Image: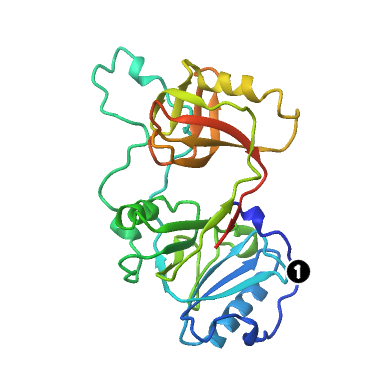
Amino acid sequence: MSMKTWTQFTRTLPKKINLNEVQNQSEANCIVLLISNHFSNSKIKEFHQYIYNQFNGKSLIGAVVDSVGAPGYSLTACHGIGFYSKPGRIQKQKAVGRWPSMFNQPMVDNPIFKTISLKAQNVNQDVLPNNSLSSNPSLLLTFSDNEPYDLYDHFQSQYPDSIKMGLVASRTPFLNGNPYTLFYNDQTISNGCVGLSTTDKVNFSYNDSIFQPLHDDYLTISKSQGNIILQIEGSDASRLLVEKVSTQIQPHSDFNLYIRIKSQTNQEMIFSIIGGDLSKGTLAIETLSDLTPGMKIQVSNSHELTISL
């Protein structure tokens, strides 16, 4: 979910708030607090402690984010379990979409890699949540640094049917010297992940009408490797993409490219295109799942994604 969705801010935080305006706060046991990074560090710390003290006895999670709708902070009362997870392993992402052609090199007779995006099956114990979560949560909501992958691997393994949503917090080194600013109860945490697990019924929907297809027909993936598309319709993937979208995109315009993928069972998913290499003809898709030949794809452009619960 893009942090651009938090759009407006104000430069002053209130000394006090009317707690009666926070819906469901009497039945809730967890508070979600988001604060815009346009405030000073001292104001953010003061407001964080004030909110935690006002809801004494309830757990609190949250983060400093790029911006929040007026009045510059978001306060939500929920029923669920708040948790903290330590930082996961650093994932090397600079090479995504630009893997060397190791399978074609004569020195590699029996390559050990079956797929580029293959993940280790052992769960990194360090990233497990500090609190026991519900056995079958309806929603797992997180605010994190930019390395939540190990935790989400665990979530997907343990809770495959749960809705999982995450927001990467704003970078705050110039605000307070920390890479990120996350809230867990009365503590300020500089990395890792904080989150909420709830069993309450969640009505989840997203608006994908803003995804405008750049071509009418669905194209078939002919060859892929992990999250890398190698060939589409038997041609180099990146070159075919350029041919399809070059007449639809204005030169020097600011846009994001997404790919709608339809599986062979007609399930649809939307992912961001994060890289490509014209010399190799490849496209890199922002997914930890393996793409497979036979999947149908359609390229779209969009400026933001709207999600509502």
Find numbered disc 1 in the image and state the secondary structure of the residue it sits on: loop
Q: In the rendered image of this protein, does residue 128 appear above or below residue 210?
A: below
Where in the figure is residue 110, as x and y percent of width and height? Answer: 23, 20
Where in the figure is residue 251, as x and y percent of width and height? Answer: 75, 28
Depth check: 111 or 202 in front? 202
Q: In the rendered image of this protein, does residue 221 appear above or below residue 172?
A: above
Q: Is residue 1 visible?
A: no
Q: In the rendered image of this protein, does residue 280 appear above or below residue 229?
A: above
Where in the figure is residue 163, as x and y percent of width and height? Answer: 43, 58
Where in the figure is residue 138, as x and y percent of width and height? Answer: 41, 64
Q: Residue at x 46, y 76 (%)?
A: 79
User: Going by the image, does 238 lie left or right of 158?
Assistant: right
Q: Residue at x 75, y 74 (%)?
A: 12
Tag 1: residue type? Answer: Thr
**Way the structure is coloured:** rainbow
Q: Is residue 104 visible?
A: yes
User: Going by the image, does 95 lie left or right of 308?
Assistant: left
Quadrant of image for the C terminus: bottom right
Depth check: 216 or 222 in front? 216
Q: Residue at x 48, y 27 (%)?
A: 98
Q: What is the quadrant of residue 275 in the picture? A: top right
Residue lying furthest front in this view?
266
The residue to which callout 1 is attached is: 10
How many discs appear? Answer: 1
User: Going by the image, does 61 lie left or right of 40?
Assistant: left
Q: What is the quadrant of residue 7 in the picture? A: bottom right
Depth check: 221 or 94 in front? 221
